[in-house]
Image (tube, rainbow, N blue to C red):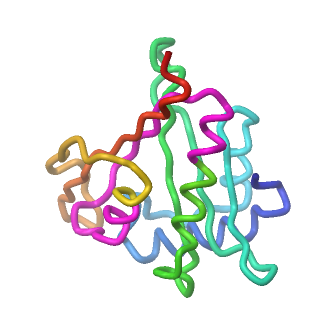
Amino acid sequence: MASLDDIPAMTQIYNEGIEDRVGTFETRPRSHDDVRAWFDGVHPLVVVERDGRLVAFGSTSSYRSRDCYAGIAEFSVYVLRAMRGQGAGRVAMEALIAAAAQAGYWKLVSRIFVENTASRSLMARVGFREVGIYEKHGKLDGVWRDAVIVERIIPENVR
């Protein structure tokens, strides 16, 4: 699980994702205070370390405010630019799925840019299915971007 000590590294990794324009519609770099707000005690956050350095993280957040969606969390996973393609994202996702299951969530959902084949492939490998595509879901740098919707049921929490 992530700790408050991980905030500087998580901020750096997230800001790399923003700069690279392949993983989020966000354009404004985030501060340590922005990332600290993710630590709400309800939504699991996990980190992956290699050789004592934080190289990836996975986070969950609220999906919708209606009570019927209380067991669904949105998720994100980000990997340090220099470590992409080396398995850290998979470790983060497996840990995040386990943490979400332990926290009682029954489903994880997210959106991935259609052209982000690395993320789409990773999600398929860890049991997510592609549900559909949001066309022109948002503009990034003035360009409309489509996003693939992914979901994974956590079977042990579906009763």
Q: Which residue is at 50% across, 80% downward?
A: 84
Q: How many marks?
A: 0
Q: Which residue is at 62% across, 44% downward?
A: 98
Q: Position of residue 148 (x, y in %)?
A: 25, 51
Q: Residue furthest left?
A: 135
Q: Position of residue 82 (x, y in %)?
A: 55, 87
Q: Quadrant of residue 37?
A: top right
Q: Is residue 70 magenta?
A: no
- The residues colored magenta run 97-122
Is 12 left or right of 147, judged from the image as shown? right
Q: Residue furthest right?
A: 5
Q: Is residue 109 magenta?
A: yes
Q: Quadrant of residue 156?
A: top right
Is 131 left or right of 96, judged from the image as shown? left
Q: Residue furthest bottom?
A: 82
Q: Position of residue 88 (x, y in %)?
A: 57, 72
Q: Position of residue 135 (x, y in %)?
A: 14, 48
> Foreground residue, 11 or 113?
113
Q: Which residue is at 82% across, 54% downward?
A: 3
Q: Is residue 55 above or below residue 57?
A: below
Q: Which residue is at 25% across, 57% downward?
A: 139
> Foreground residue, 122 or 135?
122
Q: Residue furthest top?
A: 67
Q: Is residue 141 above or below residue 132?
A: below
> Foreground residue, 10 or 44?
44
